[in-house]
């Protein structure tokens, strides 16, 4: 059984390593068959994956698996579309910065990392 702390540690680390670190010069994702892009991070018995397709609109799914089991112990589906005078790139940049700031400044991050 995975503790809440282990699960949160993996979720924070996985999101920082893929979504937050991705830039115009660094892409931790690889081309995927099912989605456009996929990311995997294995730490101990836990595996974090993030897969997405598109940019605007975009959709994807994050999973955490335990002990190479094919059934996830945690999942998050997401979808987005920007329809405004602000570009999709600008919104994406804001979302990325907000997620980074939250993940790096939340009390849980400070306790777990």
Image (spheres, helix red, strand yellow):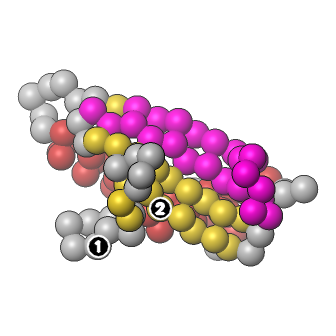
Secondary structure of the residue carrying tag 2 is strand
Q: Given the current orientation, which residue lies at the most extreme right position?
A: 1
In this rendering, which labeled residue sits more in front, label 2 or label 1? 2
Residue 79 at what x, y percent from top left?
40, 32
Q: Determine the main secondary structure of the stretch shown in magenta.
A: strand
Magenta residue check for 65:
yes
Q: Residue at x 55, y 47 (%)?
A: 62
Residue at 36%, 60% in the rendered image:
31
Give the mark, 2 or 1, whose residue is nearer the N terminus.
1
| Mark 2 lies on residue | 39
Look at the picture and state if 79 lies above or below 104: above
Magenta-span inclusion, residue 49:
no
Instruction: List x then y, in percent, for residue 93.
Output: 25, 51
Q: Which residue is drawn at 80% across and 64% down?
A: 67
Q: Quadrant of residue 101?
A: bottom left
Who is closer to the viewer here, 87 or 62?
Answer: 62
Task: Say which residue label 1 marks.
Answer: 26
Spot occupied by residue 76 in the image (x, y as percentages of width and height): 58, 39
Asked if residue 4 shows in the view, the reply is: yes
Q: What stretch is highlighted in magenta?
A: 57-79
Locate the C terminus by quadrant. bottom right
The Cα atoms of the two marked residues, 2 and 1, are separated by 13 Å
């Amino acid at each position: 059984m995975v503790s809440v702390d282990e699960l949160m540690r993996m979720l924070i680390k996985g999101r920082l390593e893929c979504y937050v670190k991705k830039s115009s010069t660094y892409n931790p994702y690889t081309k995927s068959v099912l989605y456009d892009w996929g990311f995997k991070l294995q730490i101990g018995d836990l595996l974090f994956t993030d897969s997405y397709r598109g940019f605007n609109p975009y959709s994807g799914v994050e999973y955490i698996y335990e002990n190479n089991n094919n059934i996830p112990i945690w999942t998050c589906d997401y979808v987005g579309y920007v329809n405004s005078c602000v570009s999709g790139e600008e919104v994406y940049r804001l979302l990325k910065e907000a997620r980074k700031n939250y993940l790096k400044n939340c009390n849980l991050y400070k306790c777990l990392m």
